[in-house]
Amino acid sequence: MEELFKERKQKIISFRKLLHREKKVTRKDVPENIFVQCPKCKETILSQELEASYYVCPHCHQPLKIDAYTRLKYVLDEGSFHELYARMVTDPKIDFPGYQEKLARESKKSGLRDAFVCGVGRIEGMKVAIGVLDSRFFMGSMGSVVGEKVTLLIEYATKKKLPLIIFTASGGARMQEGIVSLMQMAKTSAALSRFQSHGGLYISYLTDPTTGGVTASFGMLGDLILAEPRALIGFAGPRVVEQTIKRKLPEGFQTSEFLLEHGFVDMIVERADMQKTLALLLRLHGGEKR
Ligand SMILES: [Zn+2]
C-alpha cells in the first residue's frame, strides 16, 4: 500500500503543468492515471476525472482555468466553429520597450497570436457569433488586437444579424499599449451600442478573472450578463479599492455571487450547464436554426 501511494505521489503534477502538457502531447501519448493538484484546495484529482467534470474541481467545486478552444468545444455543436480574424497580430510600430519580445514569448507559450479567439458556430443548431478571451496570453489583457477583433466580431454579428456571445477573462487594459489600449474600451462599447440599436442580442459570460478595461466596457454591457461561479469580477483589485477608500471590504466582495446579489449579474451558470443555458436563452430570444 505504501508503495502504491509512493508511486501515485510521483505522478502528481500541477494543474498548470497539465494544461501545458496536454498542448504538447497527443492524447494517445498521455500516460494513464496522472494526478493533478487543484490550485485552490490542493487536493489531488485524477486527470481523466477532471476532464469529465469540465475542469471543475470535484472537491472544492472551483472552476479551473480552461483555454479558449476548450471553452468553445464545451458550448458549440461539434465541428461547427469557423474562426475569424485568426491571423491578426500587434502592429510592430507599438514599440514600448521589450513589448514585441514579450509578445513573442506569450505567443510561443500559449500557441496563440493574441488573447481573443472568435468566429461563428452553432449552439443546438442556432448560429451565433462567438468570442473567448484566453487568459494564457498576456493575462487576457486588452490591447489593439483584442479590441479590434472584438469590434470586428460585433460588426460581423450586426451585419449578419446574429446573436453575439463573448466569454471574458482579463487582467484589464494592456499597459504596454498605453492610450491605444484605453481607446479599445470606447471602440468596443460604440460598436456594441450600434449592434444593440439594431436589435441584436448580446450575452456576456464573465469568467475568472474579469477586471479593468474589459469589465468597464464589453464585459458589463451584455443584454444578459452571465458569470461562472466563484469568479473574480471587478474593476480595480480589492487591495487597491481598500487602500483608496480606507475601509475593509465585505466578505466575498467582487465575486460572481456578490455581484448577482447586488444586481450586476443576471445569472450564475455552472460550466456543465453552459451549452443548454445558452441554447435556452437563444430560443427565448427568437433564435432559429438557419
Ligand atoms: Zn479544489
Image (cartoon, rainbow, N blue to C red):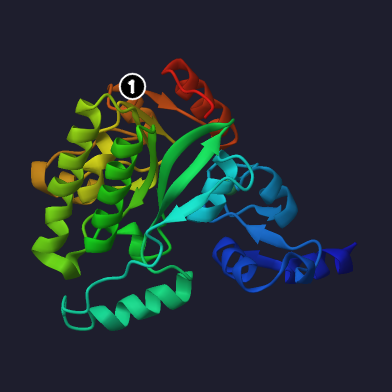
Q: Is residue 286 above or below residue 100?
A: above
Depth order, front residue of 147/175: 147
Horizontal relation, residue 195 to residue 124: left or right: left
Q: Is residue 254 left or right of residue 50?
A: left
Residue visible at 18% across and 33% down in the picture: 193
Residue visible at 57% across and 69% down?
A: 20
**Place of residue 149 in the rendered image (x, y in percent of width and height, measured from the top left):** 30, 55
Left or right: 276 with respect to 222? right
Q: Which residue is mark 1?
A: 261
**Crowd around label 1: few <14 · some 14–19 · many ≥20 (10 Å):** few
Q: Is residue 7 above or below residue 75?
A: below
List x then y, in percent, for residue 178.
12, 65
Tell me which corner region of the image, top left, top right, bottom left or bottom right, holds residue 8: bottom right
Q: Is 223 situated above or below 147? A: above
Q: Quadrant of residue 18?
A: bottom right
Give me the residue at 64% from left, 66% from top. Answer: 22
Tell me if residue 147 can be seen. Answer: yes
Residue 268 vertical position relative to residue 9 in the rendered view, above or below: above
Q: Position of residue 40 (x, y in %)?
A: 52, 51
Q: Is residue 63 left or right of residue 148?
A: right
Q: What residue do we see at 28% from left, 21% from top? A: 263
Which residue is at the front of the view, 80 or 181? 80
Residue 65 seen in the figure: no
Q: Quadrant of the N terminus?
A: bottom right
- Label 1, secondary structure: give it: helix
Kindly identify the amino acid type of the residue bearing the numbered disc 1.
Answer: Glu
- Residue found at the far right of this picture: 1
Tally the marks: 1
